[in-house]
Amino acid sequence: MTLLSILTLYIAFRIKQFTCDFLFQTDWMALNKGQPGKEGYRALFTHTAFHMMGTFIIVMLLAPAFWWLAFVDFVVHSIVDRAKGVYTYKKGWAYTDKLFWWSFGLDQEAHNFTHLAYIILIVVHSGGLAISG
């Protein structure tokens, strides 16, 4: 892979994260994905299905052999968001609390590092970085 293709993957995953977490995520998803019971899981899985579709589009365009990462992303994103949502809910943190924003930032960085892991996996299994001199 070239440095440009790696950068393209990174930018694509960052756009996907922003789009799915901020533009496509409804209030219902955001406010309920940490709730107990079926409603919480329904909101969570609806949200993470958008991430799965976004990852699927990225890999099909840029690294089709890794189509299965879409399903991995569904699971990983669900675990990260559920953990953050449940913890925030149990602590009773609201957007006016500093610790809410710390957990929010930690959640976003967990997704960023997850995407970095996907990129490393794709690069390594695609023959590494091709540097021409």
Image (tube, rainbow, N blue to C red):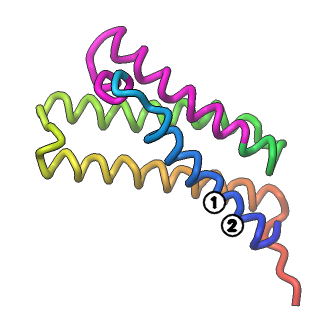
- Which image quadrant: the C terminus? bottom right
Residue named by callout 2: 7
The percent coordinates of residue 2 (x first, y second) are 81, 71
Question: Does 47 lie within the magenta span?
Answer: yes
Write down the region rendered in magenta: 29-57
**Residue visible at 31% across and 10% down?**
37
Disc 1: CA contacts within 10 A as few (<14), some (14-19) or many (>=20): some
Relative to 64, is 111 on the left or the right?
left
**Residue visible at 31% across and 22% down?**
32
**Main SS of the magenta segment?**
helix
As drawn, 83 above or below 111: above
Question: Does 32 lie within the magenta span?
Answer: yes
Q: CA distance from mark 2 to mark 1?
A: 5 Å
- Which image quadrant: the N terminus? bottom right
Quarter assignment of residue 131: bottom right
Query: Could you say whether the residue bearing mark 1 is in a helix, strand or loop?
Result: helix
The percent coordinates of residue 114 (x first, y second) are 53, 50
Disc 2: CA contacts within 10 A as few (<14), some (14-19) or many (>=20): few
Residue toward you, 25 or 123: 25
Which residue sits furthest front?
23
**Residue visible at 58% across and 51% down?**
15
Relative to 19, is 61 on the left or the right?
right
Tell me the amino acid under the disc marked 2: Leu
Residue named by callout 1: 10
The percent coordinates of residue 67 (x first, y second) are 76, 37
Q: Are marks 2 and 1 in contact (CB under 8 Å)?
A: yes
Quarter assignment of residue 129: bottom right
